[in-house]
Amino acid sequence: MSETGPIPPRVDTVPAAIVRSRTPSPGRPWAYLAGLLLAAGATFGAFWAWGHQARGAPITVRFSEGHGLKAGDAIRHRGIEVGRVRAIQLSATLDSVTVDCDLFRGAEGLAREGTQFWIVRPFVSLSGVRGLETLVEGRYLAVRPGNRRNRVAREFTGLDEQPVLGLQAEGALELVLEADHRQGLGHGSPVRFRGMKVGEVVAVNLASDAMTVELRILIAAEYRLLVRNNSVFWNDGGVDVRFGFRGLDVDVGTLETVARGGISFSTPDDAEDAAGTGRRFPLQPKEPRDWHDWKPNLIVGDPTSVPTRPLPTPLRAQFAMPSRLLGIPRTVRRDGWILAMDNDQILLTSRFVDGNEEGFPKGTLEFAGQRLPLADRPHQQHGQVLAIHVSDLPGHEPRWPWSRVRRAKGPEECLLVPGSGQPPLALAQHRIQPADDHWDLDAGLPVGPDWESALVVSRQDGCVVGLLSFQDEVVRVELIDPSKFIGTSSSPKR
């Protein structure tokens, strides 16, 4: 046997990588440079677009206090961000705070005269809680835009408090109450009618002669007709303690009125004309003794346009008919209303002129300065509604289109509309009892026989749906069906 040495371990050889250098093509560095330029351009465009948006319209708002507002805080309108606070600093006179802001593009329309700004911050009291979102999100500037037709503005004076009722709300009624002392009332104190909030106190100041305290209040537009020239206002805040035969009587208002005070008002049954802006009323320290019995018929909402159209204007008329009493001749007269239509007809109830299917008695109808004999007068009648043909209607009197008369499908919210400048009355749906061709109305309505043929107008669309009528002391609405009258539109425009 031949001896052999140890077997050497096997070593696998790894091939070495061969690196070959390549000479770049002459145009490739320019491609790299173009990519860098594109990236830089995109970055610059993004920053430019952000800056252009953030500075769509620079404005300055001055406040008496900063309330912790800082640069970068938002400006919000209707819950969305419309701008940013750019800088905040003391004014040169050190008596106010100057806030420089930028409105975003698309929100430049807010920079107009009349726009209001205020700082939203957390507020907690017995009278209410608001601004709690600022505990998490931080304070912000809220904005209420001015009229779009106002001039562009760049400088504004901010409000110290959140405005109440929209201080510049269109149609709001501003009144002044005079009192011997403040009576615990202040900015934001509620104004109520029958316990319902209809307005707020917006300012409390001494009179110019310091003899009384003047409270400026705003009544929301939809409630302004509740205030009449003989309305009575009284302090309704705090706790009223009285001693009587039954012992101690304690009357505690709502938590809000206890905390901030409150004002109530009511109007007597013989309601006078609606109060105008700026009218002054005395503020009574206590409520009138019998105010709970006052129940005037007052309108809630805008009566001049239902909903956005003018009301019809009926004409005052008088029916005169010769008669005899115990053989003595006399003339019976009756007052009411008529509505001149656009097809040379007048609308009225048959009861106004004692009409029937066969014709009219020998009477005359006087209106607009003329006397209209009714005997043998061409007419149409459906139910208790008459349409009398009048070829010589005065041209200056307003005409109502038949297209604005419709058939009511059921009881609905309406207005009772007389003419001659008299205010309309509200007719609530729940005071109507429907019948076949008419509605029976609540006997408590403040109307009388001289309202015969007054118009019943829908508050939904402003169409005439009926005429007021009286029969055996029962107040009714005679419903109108235009399709029953020849020469009228059976499908009026709605």
Image: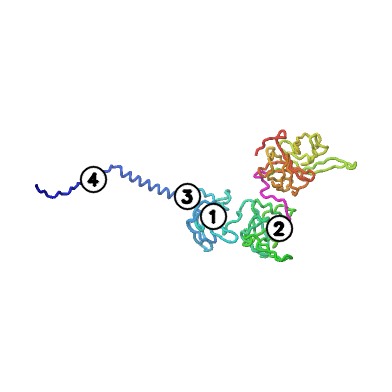
Q: Visible in this render: residue 132?
A: yes
Callout 1: SS: strand
- Give the CA distance from mark 3 to mark 4: 53 Å
Residue 22 placement: quadrant:
top left
In the figure, is residue 358 to the left or right of 198?
A: right
Question: Is residue 307 highlighted in magenta?
Answer: yes
Image quadrant in which you'd find residue 414: top right
Residue 331: x percent and y percent? Answer: 85, 42
Q: Measured along the vertical axis of the image, is residue 59 above or below residue 365?
A: below
- Residue that mark 2 sits on: 232
Give whichever of 313, 196 is nearer the camera: 196
The answer to whether the residues at label 2 and label 3 have Cβ atoms under 8 Å apart is: no
- Give neighbour class at mark 1: few <14, some 14-19, many 20+ (Cα, 10 Å): many
Residue behind mark 1:
142
Q: Which circle, 3 or 1, is nearer the viewer?
A: 1
What segment carries the magenta color?
287-310
Badge 2 crowding class, 10 Å Cα cut-off, few under 14, some 14 to 19, many 20 or more, is some
Secondary structure, mark 4, is loop
Q: Amino acid at mark 3?
A: Gln
Residue 53 is tagged as 3
Instruction: Work out whether residue 238 or residue 49 is closer to the camera in this orientation and state it.
Output: 238
Task: Check contact, mark 1 vs mark 4: CB within 8 A.
Answer: no
Which element is circle 2 on? strand
The kind of residue on which mark 1 rests is Ala
Residue 252 x/y as whole percent:
66, 62
Q: Amino acid at mark 4?
A: Val
Which marked residue is nearer to the observer: mark 3 or mark 4? 4
Name the kind of residue labelled 2 in the image.
Val
Q: In the shown orientation, is residue 94 left or right of residue 4?
A: right
Describe the element under mark 3 as helix, strand or loop.
helix
